[in-house]
Amino acid sequence: MATKVVLITGAAIRIGACIARTFHSKGFDVAISYRSSLTAAQALIDELNAIRADSASCWPAEMTDQASVSRLGRDVLAHHKRLDVLVNNASSFYPTAYGDSTQAQWDDLVGSNLRGAYFLTQQLSAELTANFGAVVNLTDTHADRALPKHPIYSIAKAGLKAMTKSLAIELAPRVRANGVSPGAILWPPSLEDDNDPAVEAGRQTMLAGIPLAKLGKMQDIADTVYF
């Protein structure tokens, strides 16, 4: 039986890398894309290939650029010869004040979170259909509850959630389409400095809005995506 293959976008670091390791541990060959984290992507691929030779590959991709998205799909299929699972994880995230937001910010946030995922899935849908495959989109709790000072990001994630529902209809019955919506898993960049007293206060404010009063774990998300 042929080894199954998963493509995970934006998977050089953080949750994407955890998803890649999880699928690899279950016997999948893994392809990941990266935007700028070449060193981290190559280190991850080297790690996985050391466990099982020729089982992992990495590819540069700018998800806001259609030519780059198309090249990613072609290159992964040419290299791995099949695809069984597509995980749309790539995402830009930063604040955009509503009154000052720009077309460039819109193009970047909507492109990386929504448009790139849509057209990559479209390109690979025939291969996924042939293999009774699956699409998993990493949405966000802010698809339902907009994040203050992040209107474009929230809009893009809401669009990705709607896209997931549409794909579940359009690709049925041979392809499953699901979304995974992480809550608080990692501290945002503004709350990463352990030596800043103001950071600890900000963390406590953030945790106060979580019923369990703690962050989730990346492995929780990776296990859900694999399931």
Image (cartoon, helix red, strand yellow):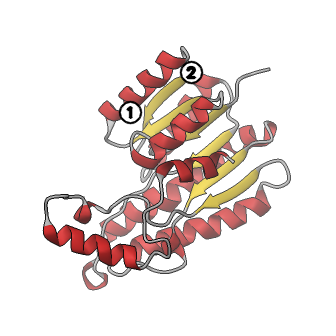
As drawn, which residue projects farthest toward the left?
196
**Where residue 3 sits in the image (x, y, percent)?**
70, 24
Residue 193 placement, left or right of 158: left
SS category of the residue bearing label 2: loop
Quadrant in which the N terminus is drawn:
top right
Residue positioned 30% across, 31% down in the render? 39
Mark 2 neighbour density, 10 Å: few (under 14) some (14–19) many (20 or more): many
Q: Is residue 11 above or below residue 59?
A: below
Q: State which tag comes first along the sequence, 2 or 1.
A: 1
As drawn, which residue projects farthest toward the bottom?
99
Residue positioned 42% across, 53% down in the render? 64
- Pick the residue in front: 194 or 12: 194
Residue positioned 32% across, 39% down in the render? 37
Residue positioned 47% across, 54% down in the render? 217
Q: Amino acid at mark 1?
A: Ala
SS category of the residue bearing label 1: helix
Q: Is residue 67 visible?
A: no
Q: Amino acid at mark 2?
A: Ser
**Where residue 16 sits in the image (x, y, percent)?**
47, 45
Q: Which residue is mark 1?
A: 41
Residue 119 placement, left or right of 107: right
**Where residue 223 sits in the image (x, y, percent)?**
61, 47
Q: Which residue is mark 2?
A: 55
Gap in angstroms between the C-alphas marked 2 and 1 = 14 Å
